[in-house]
Every structure is written in C-alpha cells, then in structure tokens.
Image (cartoon, grey):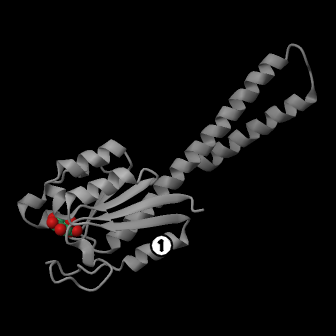
C-alpha cells in the first residue's frame, strides 16, 4: 500500500480542470494538466485523490470525511473570499493544507485580496497557474516525509530511553556483556538518526 494519502480539492467552476480550456473561467490558463500532478503522485509513494464540487456543502462533507488523508491541497475558488464554513471544516479536522490559486489574486479586484484560509494554511501558492498544483504536491511530499522521519526517530529515541532505563536497573545486579551490546547498538542508531535528520 502507498505510504501517504493526499486529497486535492477544487472549488466551484474548477470542474474543467484536467480537460480543456473552460469557457466559464475568465483566466487565460484555466486549463490544468492534472495529468502532471497525477504523474508526480504516481512517481512517489502517494495516493492522490481528486475532488471537485460547486457547493460548500459537498466540499465540507469531503473535508470532514477523509480523515485518513495526511495532507490537503485546496483551491477553494470563490469560496476563498467568503467561506468561514470551509475554513472551520479544515480547522476541525486539523489536516495540514496548502492553498492554491491559479491566478495571482493580489493582482485582481480588492475583494480577492482577502482569504479565509491563508492564515491557517501551511503555505499559499498563487499566480503560477497549473504549475502551482505540482509545487504544492512536492511540498506536501516533503512535509509528510519529514513528519514520517520525525515519528520514526521518536520511536528510536523511545527505544534507547527504555534500554538505558533497563540497563540502569540491571547494572547493579548483572554485568553481562549482552546488555552492553544492546545499549551501544541503540546509541549508534540514535547517532545515525541525528546524523540523517539534522
Ligand atoms: C481562483 C481565484 C478566485 O478568486 C476565483 O474566484 C476562482 C479561482 C484561482 O484559482 O485563481 O474561482 O481560486
């Protein structure tokens, strides 16, 4: 099975994403080669699920249902500037996410300059067109790999803590070389973990 689950969410009118240029979208680069994003996911150890909806309700239902996802990539489209409900849903599940916009919203009308998501997102990408989705996925991969490494290293630290503890307990009664070996092995592992991590 794949190591990570990532969910890509697109808000209203982004349904033509991955197909042809959408007439309903005003921006020039409305066509999104989702294929590239899917390819990138396939190259890595990732399950990428994609979902598009025009209604807040369906987006919220998706956000709160997919608990098993480790990361969300979301373009909330026009809801970016209006939806406290979507923001609350993301906060409720507290799954880290990147906010994506095809266009540079700061170049556009003043009402697009405010986002209900930016202050709670890991990061925001806007104005880079379809490429933004690929960059966001790359970031998500780094983020999840780092998190995975941290939890692995924490397990190693916990193991050495237990070993040191056992050793301290055993030391007064036994002087076996075996326990020493186990202890040194653990120390070596921790040193390796530190070396790779920092
Ligand atoms: C958008 C920017 C929003 O302001 C707009 O309402 C959209 C698309 C973008 O990707 O550039 O629908 O999120």
For residue 103, what is the image quadrant? bottom left
Q: Is residue 99 left or right of residue 165?
A: left
Farthest residue to the top: give it.
Answer: 172
Left-right relation of 164 to 76: right
| Residue 52 position within the rendered picture, expressed as x and y whole percent measured from the top left | 29, 68
The residue drawn where x is 46% and y is 52% is 68
The N terminus, quarter of image: bottom right
In the rendered view, would you say 36 is above or below 186?
A: below
Q: Position of residue 133 (x, y in %)?
A: 35, 69
Figure quarter occupied by ligand 1: bottom left
Vertical side of 31 occupied by 174: above or below: above
Residue sitting at 78 percent across and 19 percent down?
Answer: 168
Q: How many marks?
A: 1
Q: Residue at x 34, y 66 (%)?
A: 51
- Viewer can see residue 120: no
| Residue drawn at (13%, 58%) of the image | 113
Is residue 153 in view from this perspective? yes
Please provide percent x and percent y for residue 135.
38, 67
Q: Around disc 1, counting alpha carbons within 10 Å, would you say few (fewer than 14), some (14 to 19), or many (20 or more)?
A: some
Furthest-bottom residue in this view: 20
Quarter where residue 15 is shown: bottom left
Q: Which residue is mark 1?
A: 40
- Callout 1 secondary element: helix
Residue 78: give x, y in percent of width and height.
16, 63
- Tell whether 176 sits left or right of 88: right
- Cβ of mark 1 under 8 A from ligand 1: no
Q: Return the residue nearer the eye: 117 or 197.
A: 117
Q: Is residue 83 left or right of residue 36?
A: left
Outermost left residue: 110
């Amino acid at each position: 099975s794949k190591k990570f689950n990532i969910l890509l969410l697109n808000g209203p009118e982004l349904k033509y994403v991955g197909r042809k240029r959408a007439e309903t979208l005003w921006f020039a680069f409305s066509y999104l080669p989702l294929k590239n994003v899917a390819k990138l996911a396939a190259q890595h150890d990732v399950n990428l699920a994609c979902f598009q909806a025009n209604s807040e309700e369906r987006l919220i239902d998706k956000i709160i249902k997919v608990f098993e996802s480790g990361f969300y990539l979301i373009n909330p489209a026009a809801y970016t500037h209006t939806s406290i409900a979507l923001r609350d849903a993301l906060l409720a599940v507290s799954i880290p996410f990147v906010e994506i916009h095809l266009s540079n919203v700061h170049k556009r009308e003043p009402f697009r300059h405010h986002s209900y998501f930016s202050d709670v997102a890991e990061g925001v990408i806007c104005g880079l067109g379809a490429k933004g989705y690929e960059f966001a996925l790359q970031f998500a991969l780094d983020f999840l790999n780092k998190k995975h490494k941290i939890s692995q290293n924490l397990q190693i630290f916990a193991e050495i803590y237990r070993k040191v503890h056992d050793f301290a307990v055993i030391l007064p009664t036994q002087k076996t070389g075996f326990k020493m070996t186990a202890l040194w092995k653990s120390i070596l592992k921790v040193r390796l973990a530190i070396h790779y991590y920092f």
